[in-house]
Amino acid sequence: MNLLELQRRMSEDVRRPLTPELEMQKKTKDGRPISDLAESYIKRNDRLTSFERLEIYNRQYWFRVIAAVSEDFPALATVLGSKRFDNLVLAYLKENPSTSFTLRNLGAHLPLWLEDHPEFAPTRHALMLDVARLEWAYVEAFDRLAVAPLTQEDFADLGADSKFFLQPHLQLLNLRYPVDELVLAIHKEIPPSDIASNAVSERRQKSRHGLPRMRRSEIYLAVHRFDNSVYYRRIDREAFLLLSSLQGQHTLSEAIELAFDVSKLSPEDQARKIRECFAHAAELGWFCRNHFDHSGLQ
């Protein structure tokens, strides 16, 4: 076995998925004993067999990647409990192995993957999805670029056919549960987090101990970064549709039509909502003057 073959052998064995009991598998997919593989390139000592020495690296690799995902989804881990969450991460990473140089991207596909995996929380699947979507939106809002915002002079040249660019860090979410309350309740116990939300003023009574009770209630959130802190801002349906349409590169007139297509608001109230939405977005610097790459990080 030359050096390259040894490196490939070690890499494959170390990254081999653990069992549900978080132990190294005993056999390969084709039935070969992994103990035999280990003995082919790892020397036993007076305390550990070749298999046991390899298992140390195998388990530590998975414990590290599980911990990395846990750091980005602490609320999801709390909702599911550590045992189910560990099994969820193992199953997710088995289908979505790391392909990046950074652990930051490990959880990128988790919210979408969870849509087809209700087995981890059958009775709370929708809640689980909303928590995962919000927690990944936090990661995106914290990491993505901040582009020079439009100035007052820039707005003077815009018309009905103009297209707007929104900050890459701005994440717009339509959620079925008020999980911003739940995520905030958990994240505030984590010292490095720096999160705020206008949902604090909208909270209802909750238990003094434990997590907030979650009752189904559709909300719209804008998750964004301001002065190196991430904020969750609740917005109304029309503002969500308007901003989402602009983010999708519809013209201003198209975005307004989509936002109020089935609205029962009077023309005067619609105009007021449009003014409020643009005033808030402009004040927070959400509109950009430059094109940008949505996939770019800071």
Image (cartoon, rainbow, N blue to C red):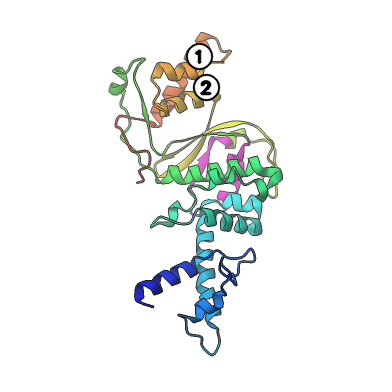
The answer to which quarter of the image holds residue 21 is bottom right
Which residue position holds label 2? Answer: 238
Residue nearest the viewer, comparing 191 with 287: 287
Q: Secondary structure at mark 1?
A: helix
Horizontal side of 186 relative to 227 (left or right) equals: right
Task: Evaluate whether residue 86 shows in this view.
Answer: yes
At 38% from the left and 20% from the top, the residue drawn is: 251
The answer to which quarter of the image holds residue 128 is top right
Give the Cα distance between marks 2 and 1. 9 Å
Task: Evaluate whether residue 207 shows in this view.
Answer: no
Q: Which mark is residue 270?
A: 1
Q: Quadrant of the N terminus?
A: bottom left
Residue 164 is situated, as x and y percent measured from the top left of the image, at 36, 25
Residue 252 is situated, as x and y percent measured from the top left of the image, at 39, 19
Residue nearest the viewer, comparing 39 with 15: 39
Q: Does the magenta-highlighted stretch encompass residue 173?
A: no
Q: Amino acid under label 2?
A: Glu
Q: Secondary structure at mark 2?
A: helix
Number of other residues with Cα within 10 Å of mark 2, as a class: few under 14, some 14 to 19, many 20 or more: many
Q: Does the magenta-highlighted stretch encompass residue 180?
A: yes
Q: Which residues are magenta?
A: 177-199
Q: Is residue 5 above or below residue 46?
A: above
At 49% from the left and 70% from the top, the residue drawn is: 13
Q: Are the two marked residues, 2 and 1, in contact with CB atoms closer than 8 angstroms?
A: yes
Residue 209 is situated, as x and y percent measured from the top left of the image, at 70, 49
